[in-house]
Image (cartoon, rainbow, N blue to C red):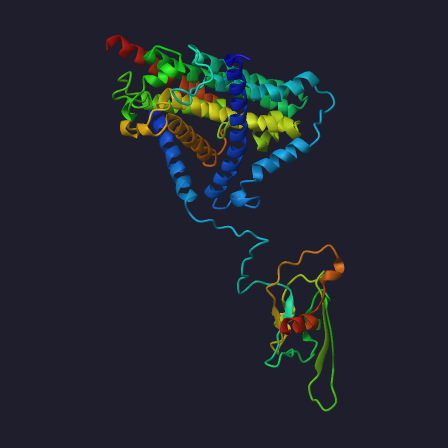
Amino acid sequence: MSTTLLNVIFAVVAAIAFAALNAAYLVWAERRGAGRIQRRPGPNINGPLGLLQPPIDGLKLMAKQLMIPGGTDKVLFIAAPVLSMFPAIMSFVTIPFSSTIVARNMDVGLLMIFAFASSGSMALLFAGWSSRNKYAMMSAVRSVSQAVAYEIPMLITAMTIVMMTGTMNLMEIVNQQGPSILHWNIFPVFGNSHNLLMPFSFLIFFTCTLAETNRAPFDLGEAESELVAGFHIEYGSMGFGLFFMAEYANIVIGSCVTTILFLGGWHPPLPFLGFIPGVIWFLLKIYMLIATFIWIRWTFPRTTIYGLLNLSWKILIPLSLFNLLFTAGLLKVF
Amino acid sequence: MGAYFSEIFKGLWSLFIGMSITFREFFKPVVTVPYPYETLKMPERYRGHVELIEDEEGKPNCIVCMACERACPSNCISLDGEKPEGSKKKVLTKYRLDFTKCSLCGSCVEACKFNALTFSKEYNLASTRKEDFYFDLLQRLEDRNK
């Protein structure tokens, strides 16, 4: 067996294991965090600090029977949960965890991640459509309109970064953000551009990531008070489990991309901290972003679908377009 | 145009204020009680089902005047007593409370002139059998003194 093939197999196994482990323990972190914010302990019965809760939940889901309700489109119904998990796993291929840990460094890595990210809403549409349930259908429609609305400002913001760095290669984008915190793209001082709007562009990107991953306060797709559970209403056992895992895997991907584009990837905040391996800095950054995701979820109530679309079309898209033009102007001048 | 931007910044600022509130809450201690493992002490004025009050010797204060039985609007109290040889006071021999009918109105406690009845602090009373709610208060008093 050639080393390339071994490399591929190792990367696939590592990506799936990383995604699954993260999904399992982010659920735990989410529940513990929600508990602390609401001044209660959260899951604490199974194992120390409730740490055995995720494997037990997983076993329960796997042991349940996979029910396919009558009148569904069977092929799409089974394909949807798999499809929802696959963009997240695929995106791990090109994400650099440090200057050496990357499965496949691609020149169009950023494009690839966004291409797969947009296929995620296809899974939601399939699930909603094939379930033959009005709530699921409603949720699918909402999810797609949300994905369309938020991909635009997200891609425009990503485009500003690409214009500044001149590359779509994620490794290259991170390399240009060394060596200290002042060179990260989020801060405008010594970075690639001297664009004062970069912190706002980070906020726009982060908001869009929240919306793209269907996280609260933008989880209109599974608004349980209106749509019961949204697109996965008819799913039980591991079908539901896959949707659940995909949600958390998408959060990890979103945080990875935000870290790479704005927070300097694996670079330490100060040059003398370089003795700590880059992968630790990278993981530290993504888990801080994920903690913010969880924190935001338990702070804000869900928006309405109109509020959600207004925010995108009336505020985020004009602002990100202005930011794009401003950056282009700056690049021309300096 | 100015209103558009001020709305955005006000909205954004309010989001940060909200997040600072939850951030502070995160580090405050837990206020809930893990119920089956720990229980709260019931407050002074909590009304559980009625309970007999004992005197110094561990005997009930009750003199079997039947005021509580008459006061009960749901007829859930039935008591009985006898006068032993050579004694002037009646002694309580039976005090049954049918808790399935009791509405915890407290009329019996109000009616008692001899400081013999009080509300207990009992609240873990779930059961699947009706018979579990026919209390023998005299028996409970003895169990308490064991």
Q: Is residue A47 positioned above or below B87 on the image?
A: above
* Residue furthest to the bottom: B86
Q: Position of residue A232 (x, y in %)?
A: 62, 26
Q: Quadrant of residue A59?
A: top right
Q: Position of residue A93 (x, y in %)?
A: 49, 17
Q: Position of residue B31 (x, y in %)?
A: 48, 50
**Residue at position x 44%, y 25% from top?**
A255
Is residue B112 toward the left or the right of residue A303 in the image? right
* Residue furthest to the top: A332
The mark tally for this picture is: 0
Q: Position of residue A78 (x, y in %)?
A: 66, 20
Residue A1 visible in the snapshot? yes
* Residue furthest to the left: A334
Residue A311 visible in the snapshot? no
**Residue at position x 59%, y 81% from top?**
B56
Q: Is residue A179 positioned above or below B73 on the image?
A: above
Is residue A227 toward the left or the right of residue A289 in the image? right
- Specify the quadrant that holds the C terminus of chain A: top left
Is residue A162 toward the left or the right of residue B52 in the image? left
